[in-house]
Image: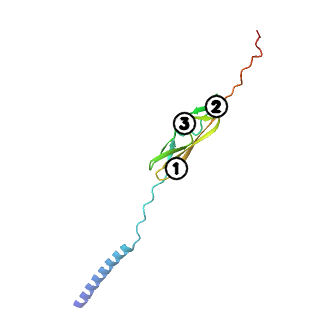
Amino acid sequence: MKTTSIILCLLCITLFHATDAWSRRRRRRSDPPPPPPPPPNTAPRFYNCPQSLPVQYTTTPTAVVTWVEPTCTDTESSCTVSRSGPPSGSSFGEGTHSIAYTATDTSGSSTSCTVSFTVNVIRCSSPSSPQHCPTL
């Protein structure tokens, strides 16, 4: 009986040690946790982008055209606005004009906005003598 108790005791110790070692080994071999998801990458938003302006009339070869320069905002980072074309307050000749703005945030996302307008030059013919006026 004493031998049986010793064998049983050794068997329990061996099983406990093997089970504990097996648990440690399983923990070591388990897959690492997945990486965190990337932060959302939303494009910046424009404010004050008038898109189209009313027709600009002038009697001179050019017209000074003004508008509110667009600004941008972004929920995750800062952003900057770049412009292709003359700024607001510049002189524009007759015809249709488009000024493109691009807002870009620090993560590289961008969005665009275009301000369009037309300059019409009013041309008057030289005055002539009235036809229905009495002559002196």
Provide the residue designation for mark 3.
88
Percent across and percent down for residue 99 are: 58, 41
Percent across and percent down for residue 104 are: 50, 49
Q: List the single residue furthest toward the top.
A: 136
Of circles 1 and 2, which is in front?
2
For image coordinates 33% across by 75% down, the residue present is 24
Classify residue 90 as left or right of residue 133: left
Mark sitting earlier along the chain (1/2): 2
Instruction: State how far apart marks 2 and 3 are (Cα).
Output: 18 Å
Mark sitting earlier along the chain (3/1): 3
For image coordinates 71% across by 23% down, the residue present is 126
Of circles 3 and 1, which is in front?
3
Percent across and percent down for residue 128 are: 74, 19
Check disc 2 and report its element: helix, strand or loop: loop
| Residue kind at label 3, given as amino acid type | Ser
Q: Is residue 85 above or below residue 17?
A: above
Query: Marks 3 and 1: CB-CB under 8 Å?
Result: no
Of circles 2 and 3, which is in front?
2
Instruction: State how far apart marks 1 and 2 are (Cα).
Output: 36 Å
Mark sitting earlier along the chain (2/3): 2
Check disc 3 and report its element: helix, strand or loop: loop
Residue 1 seen in the current view = no
Q: Is residue 120 above or below residue 77?
A: above
Provide the residue designation for mark 2.
61
Check disc 1 and report its element: helix, strand or loop: strand
Front residue of 6 and 32: 32
Provide the residue designation for mark 1.
110
- Tell me if mark 2 has few (under 14), some (14-19) or many (20+) residues whose alpha carbon lies within 10 angstroms of its own: some
Residue 12 occupies quadrant:
bottom left
